[in-house]
Image (cartoon, helix red, strand yellow):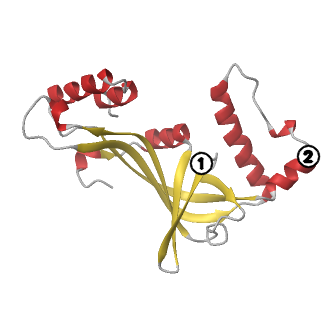
Amino acid sequence: MHPNPRFGWDDAGAMRAFVQQVSFAQIVIAADGRPLSAQAPVVIARDGSVRFHLARGNQLTGLLDGAPVLASVTGTHFYVSPDWYGSVDQVPTWNYRLVEIEGVARRLEEPDLRDLLDRLSAAQEGQLTPKPAWTMAKMDPNKLDMMLRAIVGFAIDAPSFRGVVKMGQNKAEAERQSVAAALRAIGKHEEAAAMEAPL
């Protein structure tokens, strides 16, 4: 996490909303003295746990149950040229929005895995309207059971959230607006908006 407190993100509700919106995380554990990682879609369950699934053959799958885990969720990120500030003696930087989720992983039983997949599909399919939503009910039950056996679900119970929003809050307002204008000029509208309203 960035050490400058001006970039600290303390709003737990906003961090959870961000995780739900991005819905994709880097899952990291330490095993046998080395870091291991995998990528997974994530959802926040009704009980507040963060849930995800991996392919049964993934190297992490057999190591996660009961292990300390870190899930890193990254949103908007971009390079900032020193020329864009409109002032002298600046250096290049990288701006970003990030939430880290820490806790202990727990393997999910099959009913909870189905719930995880239902929630994940509903959240993603809901963004595709007016397309009718896909659900598991559209699959042949035998084929669905076969697919479910190919994955393993996990929960991070009582997760700890910490976040960073580094969008030039340490710069003068005129410098931030100048960077936003430069980003818009090259078609990076989402990044420009993040500079103008970081939190």
Q: Is residue 94 left or right of residue 102?
A: left
What residue did someone put label 2 on? 141
Residue positioned 64% across, 69% down in the render: 65
Q: Is residue 6 left or right of residue 98?
A: left
Q: Which mark is residue 162?
A: none
Q: Is residue 50 left or right of residue 116?
A: left
Q: Say which quarter of the image contains residue 39.
A: bottom right
Residue positioned 79% across, 36% down in the render: 135
Label 2, secondary structure: give it. helix
As measured in the structure, the alpha-carbon distance from the residue carrying label 2 to the one carrying label 1 is: 24 Å
Q: Say which quarter of the image contains residue 129.
A: top right
Q: Is residue 186 left or right of residue 112?
A: left
Residue positioned 74% across, 53% down in the render: 113
- Residues marked 2 and 1 touching at CB (< 8 Å): no
Instruction: Locate residue 29, reporting x and y percent.
Output: 52, 68
Sequence-wise first label, 2 or 1: 1
In the displayed structure, 92 sits above or below 1; it is: above
Instruction: Locate residue 106, reporting x and y percent.
Output: 64, 64
Residue positioned 37% across, 23% down in the render: 187
Instruction: Locate residue 35, reporting x and y percent.
Output: 48, 70
Q: Amino acid at mark 1?
A: Val
Q: Residues within 10 Å of mark 1 (few under 14, many from 20)?
A: many
**In the rendered image, which quarter contains the N terminus?**
bottom left
For this orientation, the residue located farthest to the top is 130
In the displayed structure, 38 sits above or below 135; it is: below
**In the rendered image, which quarter contains the C terminus?**
top left
Instruction: Locate residue 96, reporting x and y percent.
Output: 35, 42
Q: Which mark is residue 42?
A: 1
Res 49 visible: no
